[in-house]
Amino acid sequence: MPATLLKEISYNAMSCLRTYLHRCVTLMHIDTMCICSALIMAGLCSLVFPAYTDTREIPSAEEVILVGGDHAFPPYEFLDSKGRPAGYNVDLIRAVAEIMDLKIEIRLGPWSQARRALENREIDVLMGIFYSEERGRLIDFSVPHSIVHHAIFIRKEYEDIKSLEDLKGKEIIVQKGDIMHDYAIQQDLSEKLILVDSPDDALRLLASGKNHCTLLLERQGLFLARKFRLTNIITAGPPFYPNEYCFAVPKGDHELLVRLDEGLRIIKATGSYREIFNKWLGGLHPTEISPIIVLRWVSIVAGLLFTVLTGMFFWSWSLRKNIRIATRRLSQELIDRRHIQDALEKETAFSTTLVQTSPTYYVAIDAQGKTIMMNETLLQALGYSQDEVKCMDYLKTFVPEPEQEMLSKVFENIVHLRDSTVSENHILTKDGRHLLVEWHGRPVFKTNGELEYFFGVGIDITERKQSEEERQRLENRLQQSYKMEALGTLAGGIAHDFNNILSSVLGFTELAKIKLAKGKRIEKELDEVLNAGARARDLVKQILTFSRQSGIRKSPTDMTSMIKETLKFLRASLPTTIEIRHHLPSYETTVMADPTQIHQVIMNLCTNAAYAMKDKGGVIDIRISEKELADKSETEFKGQTPGRYLQLSVSDTGSGIPEDIIDRIFDPFFTTKERGKGTGMGLSVVHGIIHDLGGAISVYSKPGKGTAFHLLFPRYAGKRFEQLSPHSILTMGKGRILFVDDEKGVIESGKEILESIGYTITPTTSASEALEIFRSDPDSFDLVLTDMTMPKMTGIELSKQMLAIRPDIPIILCTGSDIGTNPELIHAAGIKKMVMKPLTTNELAEAVYNALNPVEGQPRD
């Protein structure tokens, strides 16, 4: 007979005996005889099946057996005040595991989850569950480690409840998923079942004055009533429903079940079982049983066992005959197991080879930060051998010092979250090179929850990062070339605007000379010259803003004012056949953006619109409106985050965009213009800027009718910092100023202006001469006013040398263009303020006064 069939037959026989005895005991509500029956049956099985006991498969001591149970079922199983498993069942399973050399891990949780975990084979053992036929179809039970009774618990005012028959129509509290829950349903005790999560909850609810009774284990109810001092809770009537309290395993796991049964038998024989019982249940005395009933049951069980013993004797003889066959099968199984072990060793060798030869990096680091191993690929990249790296401090040896603290926090975060992570950091090679690596790391923990080691898999991304940075540089250069192309397109209009300004300057200057010769007043003509100069300055400022190459610096920016400035710039550049209309609101239109980006967006859209109307002219319409997206399903801007936005709409009456290409207009380098008249980057740049700002863009076009672009900008809800306008009255002051500029006209006019408002000026057109003057007597000056771009020595170089001589000297740097200037570098050089040429008298006076009289806490410009 096969060994597996032999095991199955013996196991089924035990189950049948247990079921039969359980039914007999249930009829009489007896506890003592159930214990006797279980002990007699265990002894019979040991006598009849000694050969089988010696030949069953023994679980490996290295395997961890997951033991589940109820986290709130005292005194049998529960979590103590420190969150550790405790109770009668816990001590019992630990004693069995110790005597049988089983390695266990106990996990307690809600009872319904624990039952489900066993049925789904997510755990190996339930350490306390009542036997029933229905449950027996889903899981396998050990011999009972206890026979327990249940009792009806009531408040003292309900002493009319004396038996189960009195519970009809009453509100009965039961633990959800407990055997009493099943029993109450099967016996149809009441339609008013109140479900709770634990016995504690049941007794507390009853003691609070709610419901009529609860059904619990007698010993458990007495334990909890005494623990929580529930003096108004008593038992009603005799105990009922004696039941076997067992270990349970997943259906079919006979080997583990046999080990548990054997462990129970040993600890009962050695007295350990009695010690555990007395520790948790010894002080709780259920109802005593009449000696007459005990004798009656002894005779019933003895007769029954005699009949069973006779049948089992002949059965045992048959089993012994097949033991020899089972032994031969076991030998074959040992041979097969050896083959499996050989296969596992080959698989381990294969995995090791795979790790060592993989092009990715592998590293293991212990809980103290020491290196355990690295694969050959990483060792070759670093220039070390395996023996060298073992036990090295990973952070101090292989991570650059500036990144060590950051990576240490990454490790701490991984351990805290107990999850994998992705990070980037540099590693140091033996010869001092830096490699940038993208790491995918995961912590590995011991069974007690402590970190055992950290395992990381890395990819060298040094070349990829360099390629990305190079691509970004090329994209920036391409965008800058597009700006220059756009300026080239507008050059004719810019030149026209400058000629108009120069005509005003020349005309009114000559008119002033004529009127001056005749002795007439010339204030009006001089005002017109000043106005023309201001227009020229604004035009140059716009050109510099549009062509600036500096990095993106976002700040609260008013859309309305930016559109007005850009349209001034555009108006002079576009043909008179094109009319520009704008509808700009009076309410605040602030967004978080770089002003240069807004310039680019408006310039690109308007120049494209003008190109579409170059033949017949037309109208460019620009307007701002408020837009609120309720959800992401908005048809026009599908997928955009809901919220409040400003919508900029730019439409024209030009030729429109054909339907077959409208989906491609935002692609880089896509253009419908003739060769040499466009790069195809304009709309691509607009699309990139809008998405970088967290907005969206849509387009509608009809050939022959025109095109409309709608752009969404997230509204800025923060505080906006307004710039103060210059004083209309000149700010007077006093002090000694060293004035340096290579333009003689600038020196002469600036000297006259500053001396007229109270300052003493030492002028020079040479940076070298200015340095010698300052070096000869540095304390004779209160301020240095210097140009940025001068022959032989720049303003920054001059400032550094002067500050080396006298660190507290205030310096104002003047420049005609901020292209190529670095504000951080200027402030690092110690320069107090930077101003843009040309300056009005008011602006110059205010800049000098503020530099000499700084307000505490005032930021630098």
Image (cartoon, rainbow, N blue to C red):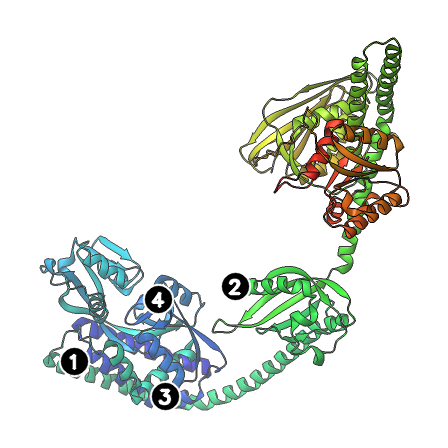
In the image, residue 743 sits, relative to residue 456, either above or below, namely: above
Q: Give the amino acid at mark 1.
A: Trp
Mark seen at residue 71: 4
Dot 4 or dot 1: first in sequence order is 4
Tell me the tag on residue 752: none
User: In the rendered image, is residue 814 in sight?
Assistant: yes
**Above or below — where is 259 with respect to 503?**
below
* Cα separation between marks 2 and 3: 52 Å
Q: Secondary structure at mark 2?
A: helix
Looking at the image, which residue is at 69% across and 67% down? 399
Find disc 2 in the rendering and name its residue.
416
Q: Residues within 10 Å of mark 1 (few under 14, many from 20)?
A: many
Quarter of the image holding residue 358? Answer: bottom right
- Res 635 quadrant in image: top right
Q: Is residue 861 left or right of residue 639?
A: right
| Location of residue 241 in the rendering, given as x and y in whole percent from the top left corner | 21, 69
Residue occupied by mark 3: 49
Circle 3 sits in a helix, a strand or a loop, which is it?
Answer: loop
User: Label 2 sits on what residue type?
Assistant: His
Residue 518: image location, x then y, percent? 87, 8
Point out the tag, 2 or 3, that comes first from the N-terminus.
3
Answer with left or right where residue 755 lies relative to residue 300.
right
Query: Which is more foreground, mark 4 or mark 1?
Result: 4
At label 4, which amino acid type do we have? His
Q: Residue at x 85, y 45 (%)?
A: 773
Q: Amino acid at mark 3?
A: Phe
Q: Foreground: 534 or 543?
A: 534
Decide: few, some or many residues near mark 2? Use Cα within 10 Å; few <14, some 14-19, many ≥20.
few
Q: Nearer the viewer, mark 2 or mark 1?
A: 2
Name the residue tied to disc 1. Answer: 297
Mark 2 in CB contact with mark 1 (< 8 angstroms): no
